[in-house]
Amino acid sequence: QKEVEQDPGPLSVPEGAIVSLNCTYSNSAFQYFMWYRQYSRKGPELLMYTYSSGNKEDGRFTAQVDKSSKYISLFIRDSQPSDSATYLCAMGGSGGGADGLTFGKGTHLIIQP
Amino acid sequence: DTAVSQTPKYLVTQMGNDKSIKCEQNLGHDTMYWYKQDSKKFLKIMFSYNNKELIINETVPNRFSPKSPDKAHLNLHINSLELGDSAVYFCASSQEGPTYEQYFGPGTRLTVT
């Protein structure tokens, strides 16, 4: 079993829909949870950074972490064609960052105009 | 005003050659990283550098050698290139020591023929 599982998609939704992206993980040491957006042939762009369980909202994006279920989610409201990209979840544990992020494989999201 | 930049963007070379990839960040961060994204799209940490000193080397062959001339630069030298080295290499940085809040460069697509 991989440390971080993420459905690769593609996930195709109409413009304006609410998008839900998810990851599950197996390592209970993970405490830091990130979502990155990666456009084709570009570097990952940090969208959300959260610590431990709970919700965090930033504009149209909401990140949720449920450590008891080892499950994290990213919600995108009022989705736009410009949101079409690959979304990567990433996690960190007790290494303080030097041990690097553990990434999911990414979900390819398509927003249809 | 690019935050994390890499050169070259594309690199095509033959097996057995030696090549370098350069990374520069203008964010004032003091920790930098190299990640590898293979053909299956998984991003994996290779090296972590803090204040020009190596912190972590994640089971990377010693043909790969990072060099940090100063806090703003982290270069990656690869000797005796092999077909399996073909991948996209991303540089990242974080502020005030290693943290999981990492910012990525645009990537260097290396193709070994």
Image: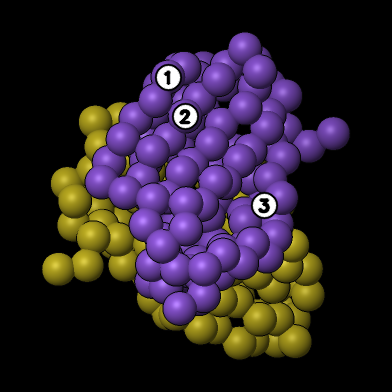
Chain colours: A purple, B yellow
* Mark 1–mark 3 CB contact (< 8 Å): no
* Mark 1–mark 2 CB contact (< 8 Å): yes
Report which residue position mark 3 lands on. Answer: A105
Residue B81, placed above or below residue A68: below
- Pick out the residue farthest to the right: A1
* Amino acid type of the residue tagged 2 in the rendering: Gln
Asked whether, in this view, residue B15 is left or right of residue B9, the answer is right
Residue at mark 1 to residue at mark 2: CA–CA distance:
6 Å
Q: Position of residue A52 (x, y in %)?
A: 45, 17
Using the image as rendered, state which of residue B79 and residue A6 is in the foreground.
A6
Q: Position of residue B88 (x, y in %)?
A: 58, 68
Label 3 element class: loop
Residue B11, placed above or below residue A50: below
Whether residue B104 is visible, yes or no, is no
Asked whether, in this view, residue B81 is left or right of residue B109, the answer is right
Any mark on residue A54, and which?
1
Q: How crowded is mark 1: few (under 14 residues within 10 Å), some or many (20 or more)?
A: few
Q: How crowded is mark 2: few (under 14 residues within 10 Å), some or many (20 or more)?
A: some
